[in-house]
Image (tube, rainbow, N blue to C red):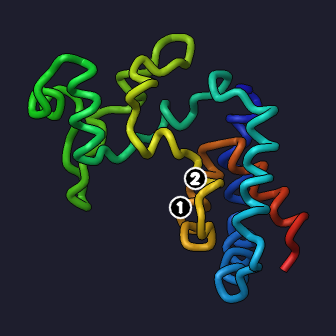
């Protein structure tokens, strides 16, 4: 996995222009079956990908925390929401709550999430490759393929399965 992660950013950068062009075409002429194809590609990739072998998302980026996330995680940790915010979160330039630090405080030494059952929505949905109306999140996907080997693989398979 270390070898894959070491090369991922470079490979994503090398393919960035082509991927951006592909996604621009995808937005202009979205195939009717896009969401079904993406769901299939996502499911196939995650049958062979174990996130516990990687956890690069948890090591390099922080999720956005919604109010519901804050309430849920704070309750799980037996803290008041404001206490949880003070201990773990900050407000970013877009006025969203995000982690103060990365890697994530809740990532253990075996790449497991210590708050997995109550993790933020952004973590539950990452890398968002099975989201409905996928064409609307292509900018996010361009960022995620440099972070997540599974997202990178899904986009590469997508381009083969759905040439534009």
Disc marking residue 140: 1
The residue sitting at 20% across, 58% down in the picture is 95
The residue sitting at 53% across, 61% down in the picture is 140
Q: Position of residue 73 (x, y in %)?
A: 28, 29
Which of 5/136 is in front? 136
Which of 3/127 is in front? 127
Image quarter of residue 72: top left
Image quarter of residue 70: top left
In the rendered structure, the answer to whether residue 12 lies left or right of residue 67 reads right
**In this figure, which residue is indicated by the disc labeled 2?**
128
Image quarter of residue 99: top left
| Secondary structure found at label 2 | loop
Q: Is residue 12 above or below residue 136?
A: above
| Quarter placement of the C terminus | bottom right
The residue sitting at 70% across, 41% down in the picture is 149
In the rendered structure, the answer to whether residue 113 lies left or right of residue 86 reads right
């Amino acid at each position: 996995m270390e070898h894959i992660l070491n090369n991922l950013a470079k490979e994503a950068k090398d393919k960035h222009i082509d991927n951006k062009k592909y996604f621009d075409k995808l937005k202009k002429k979205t195939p009717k079956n896009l969401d079904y194809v993406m769901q299939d590609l996502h499911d196939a990739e995650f049958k062979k990908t174990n996130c516990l072998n990687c956890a690069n998302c948890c090591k390099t980026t922080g999720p956005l925390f919604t109010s519901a996330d804050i309430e849920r995680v704070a309750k799980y940790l037996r803290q008041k929401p404001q206490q949880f915010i003070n201990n773990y979160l900050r407000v970013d330039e877009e006025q969203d709550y995000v982690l103060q630090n990365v890697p994530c405080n809740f990532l253990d030494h075996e790449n497991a999430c210590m708050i997995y059952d109550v993790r933020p929505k952004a973590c539950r949905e990452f890398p968002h490759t099975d989201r409905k109306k996928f064409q609307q999140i292509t900018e996010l996907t361009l960022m995620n393929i440099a972070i997540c080997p599974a997202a990178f693989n899904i986009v590469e398979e997508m381009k083969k399965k759905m040439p534009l």
